[in-house]
Image (cartoon, grey):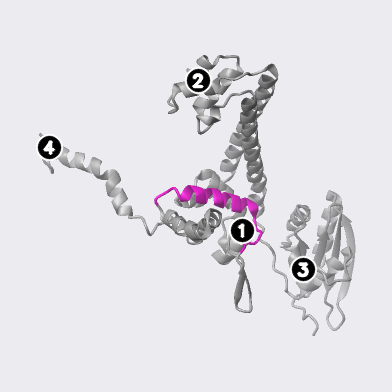
Amino acid sequence: MDIQPIFRCAVGMDVHLAIIHVCVILQIPDGEPQVHRRQFSTFQRDLRAMAEWIAGFSPETVVMESTGIYWKSPYAYLEKVGLRALVVNAQHVKKVPGRKTDTSDAEWLAMLARAGLLRGSFIPPEDIRTLRQISRYHHRTTAMLAAEKNRLVRVLSDAGIRITAVVSDAHGVAARAMIDCLLDGGTPEQALAYAGRLKAPREELLASLQGELSEDHRFVAAMIRRHITTLESQLADLEHRLFNALKPHEAALQLLLTIPGIDRLAAAKLVVEIGFDMSAFGTAGRLAKWAGVCPGNDESAGKRRSGKTTPGNRYVRTVLCEIAWAAIRTTSQFKSRYHSLVIRRGTKKAIIAIGHHVLKTVFVLLSRQVPYHDSTVDYEALRVQRNAPRWIRELKKFGYLPKAA
């Protein structure tokens, strides 16, 4: 049985680094469908010409594969001419063996699109899509900062300074001040003056600061220290830019901030990846599947073979894991759910499950535009606990309660 067409005109695009193969299938009334094939380079002038050529057919659907980052430029030029393409997963459109060429790839995409057999991936609006550059670069810069901090600790350890043996955070305010004093030529006794309120005994702190810092150690550590300062400044600039760009969506961010474990940065990173319009996903399950945090579905002959999560948006997955670690330390339903899961499933699977739960909660909040309400928390009791001392003072002040003798 032949594939039955649904659309009158469909376009398939096979996108590469330097060239794009385009195939247009146009149904002619009372005749065989016409097939038009052309190749375009990926330079600006050719992308503009490609978008105008495709728009001239007034296609009902345009499909391209999600090949790395190469799809972004042609997608943007198609948007400028009023066409919103479907970016599909390459695994969903695998070619029939024996017919693999770039031209046939584009034609196969057009045939499947014409029959309505392809479903596009989620692509956020342009204003949100461009903010992904800031959010994802912040993610990379944070990783670089963590690597540089670890590198500084290794340099100090190589010189015999074992501050990490007595201080939990070698980059806290006090520990950093002591390290800076040593690198600037101070003695361990002088550095100990910056210990502040550290709980470690002063004798152990002094012993951990005693080492043999050579000139090479000081030189490398000074370079790492300058790099750390630069990265911290870059992170602050990125966060400032991201928060300013999201000011028009402040109401949605405030809704997410009501969820335990979510701070302003996590909320901003999350909405930049998933957007604000949850109707693009339809259901919370589809959103979780797209993010790669829901259990896999592999069953045959009545037997469940695997529950491994599928690959998804790794940036959303990372943010959700960070939120989950913070949420299980709060007095919320996430904490009790984690402790019930960790015994049976282990720490990593339990954290993914909590991240899955958080993402479904985000979907509900953004869909219904309501704040988070925890069913396990007595909000009235919390309000009384917070305000009771003030209420009692006021009642005593105006004579409704007897004053203490």
Position of 222 relative to 366 (above/below): above
Q: Amino acid at mark 1?
A: Ala
Lateral position of residue 356 relative to residue 67, left or right: left
Q: Which residues are magenta?
A: 308-331
**Residue at x 70% of width, y 20% of height:** 216
Q: CA separation, marks 4 and 1?
A: 59 Å
Q: Label 3, on which residue?
A: 93
Q: Amino acid at mark 3?
A: Val
Position of 320 relative to 360 (above/below): above
Give the class, few, some or many, for how many residues have Cα within 10 Å of label 1's Cα (few <14, many ≥20). Answer: many
Q: Position of residue 8 (x, y in %)?
A: 78, 75
Q: Label 4, on which residue?
A: 403
Give the class, few, some or many, for how many residues have Cα within 10 Å of label 4's Cα (few <14, many ≥20). Answer: few
**Is disc 2 placed on a helix, strand or loop?**
helix
Q: Label 1, on which residue?
A: 291
Lateral position of residue 359 relative to residue 403, left or right: right
Q: Position of residue 362 (x, y in %)?
A: 51, 57
Residue 77 within the segment the image draws in magenta: no
**Is disc 3 placed on a helix, strand or loop?**
helix
Q: CA separation, marks 3 and 4?
A: 79 Å
**Residue at x 66% of width, y 20% of height:** 218
The quarter of the image holding the N terminus is bottom right
Nearer-the-camera pick, 338 or 1: 338
Looking at the image, tell me whether mark 1 or mark 2 is earlier in sequence order. 2
Q: CA separation, marks 1 and 3?
A: 20 Å
**Is disc 1 placed on a helix, strand or loop?**
helix
Q: Label 2, on which residue?
A: 206
Q: Amino acid at mark 2?
A: Leu
The number of discs equals 4
The quarter of the image holding the C terminus is top left
Q: CA separation, marks 4 and 2?
A: 53 Å
Q: CA separation, marks 1 and 2?
A: 48 Å
